[in-house]
Image (cartoon, rainbow, N blue to C red):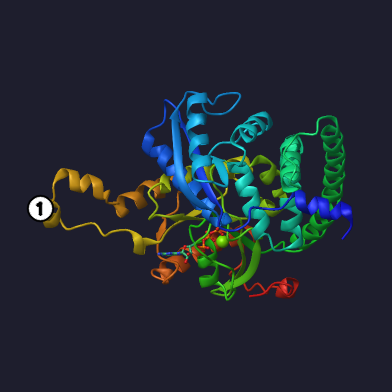
């Protein structure tokens, strides 16, 4: 390994296992404490996915973040005292930090400072499997880090055991590092362009067949559903962003073939660099005829999740695609009590239990999407038949658009999809 690659490697080391972290968020006037708590729950899950452990959270009511240190000076002092006393390894902010905020916070707190974007980027980096996904994440991470290099430099200093800043010499090093990263960005962009060109030819060859893509918030069960419908074994686990690469499989229902893709999940505030460099993966969505939007209906925030997914689809220019909604994880939703049981409960109890009226929900969303949503549990296969029926019905509709006379004996040339597994 050359000195150059060793240095690059060191610059981009991700957080080692089992570090401790405190989480920080501000509560805006328009927000409730509960809403921010839920955002922090998600941040804690992300932290856990990276292999670190939440030990405490801090919130502060502020209309907008402090331009210098994100939180006010009093709160910062509080965090600092805690971090020092309990020897916490990192401080993670639920919002994105500007390069100068990050620098200031690091100088004050003297531990690693993360924001939501960097956390997500690090998780993606850990999870990426294919050359394409790896290149995409590396590119996004370099672009994110470039303006924040001063901070990385101080990291290096500390790793080397030097505590004092080295003034001029440090500045020079930073410039060298910046140049190194800029070069690397150019190299990665070129590499990605080549990979994308290959993918494009592959995708172009897949014309004349209906294409369906599973979309949804992260951890809702897309890969589980994919595995249930196809014979593939896509990694499905209770971690955020288990899937970072997309997988395409050929499925044949009632003699009609279609392609089903599983792709990366969405989350609130997906880093823009990441969306940008994942454009080619997300192209799978843009080029689909039908989207299956999977929702974890047992999640307390499932409606916010639907909104985030809808918004992201709009941003990707895929807002007008037909959508089959799947309300998944029905096994985790407490059943609606009988009328008699309801009578015996106090108003507060009923309110706290937060029962879901599934029929009403189905009706509301059927109106919104024009297609009846399916309620199911992908893990156990509950209601898979209903899902199959809806899916094939929608696939047929799309199929008719490609082959208006498909009932009149069409023979498909399936050999063009031989590169795909079933
Ligand atoms: N209880 C329950 N758990 C489920 C169900 N479907 C999936 N899961 C679990 O939910 C977790 C996430 O499932 P995945 O299939 O990996 O979810 P995903 O949407 O592909 O997630 P990402 O790839 O991270 O975006 C796993 O632990 C699954 O076993 C279900 O119907 N019921
Ligand atoms: Mg997945």
Residue placed most toward the observer, 96 or 16: 16
Secondary element at image label 1: loop
Question: Is residue 329 left or right of 281 when viewed as pictured?
Answer: left
For the C terminus, the quadrant is bottom right
| Residue found at x 13% / y 50% | 345
Q: Ligand 2 lies in which image quarter?
A: bottom right
Residue placed most toward the observer, 285 or 33: 33
Q: Where 366 sits versus 237, above or below?
A: above
For residue 165, what is the image quadrant? top right
For residue 264, what is the image quadrant? bottom right
x and y percentages locating residue 344 in the rendered image: 10, 53
x and y percentages locating residue 359 in the rendered image: 30, 54
| Residue found at x 56% / y 42% | 91
For residue 284, what is the image quadrant? bottom right
For the N terminus, the quadrant is bottom right
Is residue 152 visible in the rendered image? The answer is yes
Q: Give the labeled residue for mark 1.
A: 344
Q: Where 213 sits versus 163, above or below?
A: below
Is residue 403 visible in the rendered image? The answer is no
Q: Furthest residue to the right?
A: 2
Question: Is residue 258 left or right of 45 when viewed as pictured?
Answer: right
| Residue found at x 45% / y 67% | 378
Residue placed most toward the observer, 280 or 270: 270
């Amino acid at each position: 390994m050359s000195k150059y690659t060793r240095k690059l490697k060191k610059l981009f080391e991700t957080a080692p296992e089992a570090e401790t972290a405190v989480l920080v968020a501000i509560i805006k006037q328009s927000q409730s404490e509960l809403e921010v708590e839920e955002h922090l729950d998600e941040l804690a899950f992300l932290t856990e996915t990276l292999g670190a452990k939440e030990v405490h959270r801090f919130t502060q009511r502020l209309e907008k973040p402090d331009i210098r240190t994100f939180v006010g000076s009093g709160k910062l002092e509080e965090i600092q005292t805690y971090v020092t006393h309990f020897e916490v390894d990192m401080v993670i902010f639920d919002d994105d930090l500007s390069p100068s905020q990050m620098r200031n916070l690091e100088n004050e707190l003297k531990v690693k400072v993360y924001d939501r974007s960097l956390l997500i980027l690090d998780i993606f980096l850990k999870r990426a499997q294919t050359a394409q996904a790896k290149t995409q994440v590396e590119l996004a991470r370099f672009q994110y880090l470039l303006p924040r290099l001063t901070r990385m430099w101080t990291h290096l200093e500390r790793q080397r055991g030097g505590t004092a800043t080295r003034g001029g010499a440090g500045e020079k090093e930073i410039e060298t590092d910046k140049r190194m990263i800029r070069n690397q960005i150019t190299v990665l962009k070129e590499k990605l362009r080549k990979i994308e060109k290959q993918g494009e030819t592959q995708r172009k060859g897949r014309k004349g067949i209906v294409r369906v893509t599973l979309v949804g918030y992260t951890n809702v069960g897309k890969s589980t559903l994919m595995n249930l419908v196809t014979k593939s074994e896509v990694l499905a686990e209770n971690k955020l962003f288990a899937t970072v690469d997309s997988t395409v499989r050929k499925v044949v229902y009632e003699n009609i073939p279609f392609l089903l893709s599983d792709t990366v999940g969405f989350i609130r505030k997906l880093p823009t660099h990441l969306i940008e460099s994942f454009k080619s993966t997300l192209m799978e969505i843009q080029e689909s005829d039908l989207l299956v939007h999977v929702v974890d209906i047992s999640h307390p925030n499932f409606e916010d999740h639907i909104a985030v997914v809808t918004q992201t689809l709009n941003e990707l220019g895929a807002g007008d695609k037909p959508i089959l909604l799947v309300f998944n994880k029905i096994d985790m939703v407490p059943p609606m009590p009988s009328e008699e049981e309801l009578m015996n409960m106090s108003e507060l109890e009923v309110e706290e239990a937060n029962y879901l009226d599934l029929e009403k929900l189905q009706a509301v969303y059927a109106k919104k999407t024009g297609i009846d949503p399916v309620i199911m549990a992908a893990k156990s296969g509950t209601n898979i038949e209903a899902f199959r029926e809806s899916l094939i019905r929608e696939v047929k509709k799309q199929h008719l658009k490609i082959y208006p006379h498909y009932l009149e004996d069409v023979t498909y040339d399936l050999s063009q999809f031989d590169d795909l597994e079933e």
